[in-house]
Amino acid sequence: MATRSLWRTRAKLAVAATALCTGGAAATVATSDDPAAALKLCTAVPLRLLRDSATAASIVFDYQYSLWGLPEGSNERAKIKHEVHLRSARKLQELCFRNGGIYIKLGQHIGQLEYLVPQEYVLTMRESMLNKCPVSSYDQVCEVFKKELGETPDKVFDEFDPKPIASASLAQVHIARTHDGQKVAVKVQHTHMTDTAAADQATVEFLVNTLHRLFPSFDYRWLVAEIRESLPKELDFLIEAKNSVKCLENFPKLSPHIADYVYAPEVHWSLSTSKLLTMEFMDGAYVNDVITIQKLGIQPSDVARLVSQTFAEMMFKHGFVHCDPHAANLLVRPLPSGKRRIFGKKKPQLILLDHGLYKELDFSTRFSYASLWRMYASQYFPQISELLRRLPRVILLMLKTNDCLRAVNNSLLHGSSLETFLIIGRVSSEAVVEAKMTQMKSLFSWIDIWFEEFLFEARLLALQIAFWLLRVRNALT
């Protein structure tokens, strides 16, 4: 009886998808200003919806059938659940690859949500999605150029390499040279993103909402809400260009002590649109390429400190945070001024790439997140998953950003570092004190704040001394 009910649920999903697929397609093509594009949309989207429905039904059936009758908390249930997680993650992975478009982006996003979705999904998506992004053909690139700038790349630029140097889920990057001789990087949006992004987003939202109605415990509507908010911004490259300008302007105004050490490529506005972004070409080492960084005469530990300082300043003081700081989006080069450290090593400059995903943190959120760091909660993140489910989405995105930064630091230092934690602790402490000072009402309040800060700084100093003594001992032995 239970099995029959589950099959009925699976059938309902398939029938609903079929009904949605067939309705209105002919009318859409007939009334469209671009019938060819409309026909492409009306054939591609229903096929994807059918795939989505079949995959969702298969996953739901697997969970319900495989776990049926197994007592909660039993070892047998845990073992079977792990196996179902793995099977389902692979089905979802295959769906993302077959559909492409925002599904690749969705898979990448799932791969960064280790606090919120089962580890089997995180690891499956993380191992596959970052290295298997779509590549648009040169003809498709020319199609985007004609629509956006009215000419093909060879007319717009003096030189244009038809082979991309990098490709991501939403776009790919080509090297070019302007007619006045400047070397530039040109980011070109994949054509299929333009064609199907809105429909794909609506499809995913429909399925997630339908599954939640059928199975209330399956509630990933927050993930759909996150994509709904961030995807339109990431698909508009002019927003990305404005983000890069604002990010760079914040450092001289709010963090002048490290302004010279942080850079973002200059935007060529006359050669940029919502689907094309032309930027200054940057030479540098990827932030996790320790060997190249050392060949440049830079200490990896200096880079790790700069990365931690930069993002701590953005989170706790600027309130405008680059939320996709994985290694491919961070370059390092020697500081152009040529300044060196005492022992002759070159000082690093951090170059921030891909400014499509930013979050603005209001005063209250910055204060709360800074206070969270002062409580040393960062040491216990894996143990507080239930708390994370209750946090605002913007804080969850900050934690995802922190994960990316931790991975970068681990690559640079071959393990975690107390010093990077001290840097973030100090900046967060400064942010908390500055926030309290703005609300100070009396001299006694000022003294209380000062004393609290003094105690916190003393603890940080003790930790830092212990850290340096440990480094000295390791050097001597």
Image (cartoon, rainbow, N blue to C red):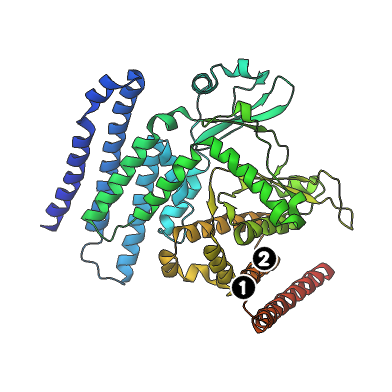
* Residue 212 coordinates in the image, percent (x, y): 26, 55
Residue hosting label 1: 436
Q: Which quarter of the picture shows residue 72?
A: bottom left
Of 324 and 150, the residue lying toward us: 150
Q: Would residue 288 be seen by someone viewing this image from the given angle?
A: no
Q: Residues within 10 Å of mark 1 (few under 14, many from 20)?
A: some
SS for dot 1 = helix
Q: Which residue lies furthest to the left in this view?
A: 1
Q: Would residue 398 be seen by someone viewing this image from the given angle?
A: yes
Q: In what quadrant of the picture does the N terminus appear?
A: bottom left
* Residue 252 coordinates in the image, percent (x, y): 73, 51
277 relative position to 209: left or right: right
Q: Which kind of residue does numbered mark 1 sit on?
A: Lys
Q: In what quadrant of the picture does the C terminus appear?
A: bottom right
Q: Which kind of residue does numbered mark 2 sit on?
A: Val
Residue hosting label 2: 427
**Residue located at (71% from left, 37% from top):** 282
